[in-house]
């Protein structure tokens, strides 16, 4: 009986795998600079930039993306000492006719950090919709522990996991 159940299960898994219509790919963004325009104040500030995913290098089109998930968010600052001004940070996607979506955060920022590796949000439904847009806006809400007269530049890299239709 156990052998029969195992054989049926194995056949089902083999059939499911053979009939798969999608593949999972990793897509890494180039470095994108988000700017919070100074003067900046102790407390909440916002940095943002528009980004367009160049999927052509992978030979895929945005319409082929079935689902997407952020795997990593890594942030440095243009001026290394600026990172010590950041108490906590959240990272979101925004776009025309799509609800803003928080995808990462770090609270508190560890003292002495040179790179911020954000914690990734568990809930990421709807991320694929952002790839359908001409561009998406990356938004970072930053709580600072001091004032800063000039701009704060965040250098951001993301890694995505994309579920894409096979062609």
Image (tube, rainbow, N blue to C red):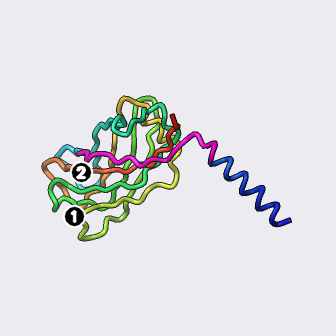
Q: Residue 106: percent from the left, percent from the top?
A: 37, 60
Q: Is mark 1 on a helix, strand or loop?
A: helix
At horizontal 13% and vertical 50% (from top left) the residue drawn is 149
Q: How far apart are marks 2 and 1 (CA)?
A: 13 Å
Of residue 27 and residue 153, the one placed in the foreground of this image is: 27
Name which of mark 2 and mark 1 comes first in the sequence. Answer: 1
Q: Is residue 86 above or below residue 28?
A: below
Circle 1 residues within 10 Å: few <14, some 14–19, many ≥20: some
In the picture, the quarter occupied by the N terminus is bottom right
Whether residues under marks 2 and 1 lie with C-beta atoms below 8 angstroms apart, the answer is no
Q: Is 27 one of the magenta-colored residues? A: yes
Which residue lies at the image location 80% right of the left edge and 65% below the top edge? 3
Q: In this view, does 139 lie to the left or right of 62?
A: left
Q: Tell me which residue sits at (36%, 29%) in the image.
A: 134
Residue 26 in magenta stretch = yes
Residue 12's disc is none
The residue under label 2 is 154
Residue 96 location (% of width, % of height): 41, 30
Frontmost residue, 123 versus 68: 68
Residue 86 spot, x, y in % from top left: 26, 60
Indicate which label's residue lies in the foreground, 2 or 1: 2
Residue 95 sits in quarter: top left
Residue found 39% across the figure and 38% down from its top: 94
Residue 84 - label: 1
The answer to whether residue 66 is left or right of residue 120 is right
Q: Quadrant of residue 97?
A: top left
Which residues are the magenta region? Answer: 18-34
Q: Is residue 157 left or right of residue 164?
A: left
């Amino acid at each position: 009986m156990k052998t029969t159940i195992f054989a049926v299960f194995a056949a089902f898994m083999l059939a499911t795998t053979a009939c798969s219509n999608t593949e999972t790919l990793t897509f890494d963004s180039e470095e994108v600079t988000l700017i919070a325009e100074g003067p900046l104040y102790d407390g909440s500030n916002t940095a943002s930039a528009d980004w367009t995913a160049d999927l052509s290098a992978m030979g895929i089109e945005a319409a082929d993306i079935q689902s997407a998930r952020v795997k990593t968010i890594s942030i440095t600052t243009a001026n290394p000492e600026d990172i010590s001004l950041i108490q906590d940070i959240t990272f979101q996607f925004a776009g025309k006719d799509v609800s803003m979506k928080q995808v990462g955060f770090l609270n508190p920022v560890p003292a002495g950090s040179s790179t911020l590796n954000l914690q990734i949000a568990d809930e990421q439904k709807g991320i694929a919709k952002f790839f359908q847009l001409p561009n998406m806006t990356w938004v970072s809400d930053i709580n600072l522990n001091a004032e800063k007269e000039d701009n704060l530049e965040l250098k951001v890299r993301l890694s995505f996991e994309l579920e894409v239709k096979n062609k």
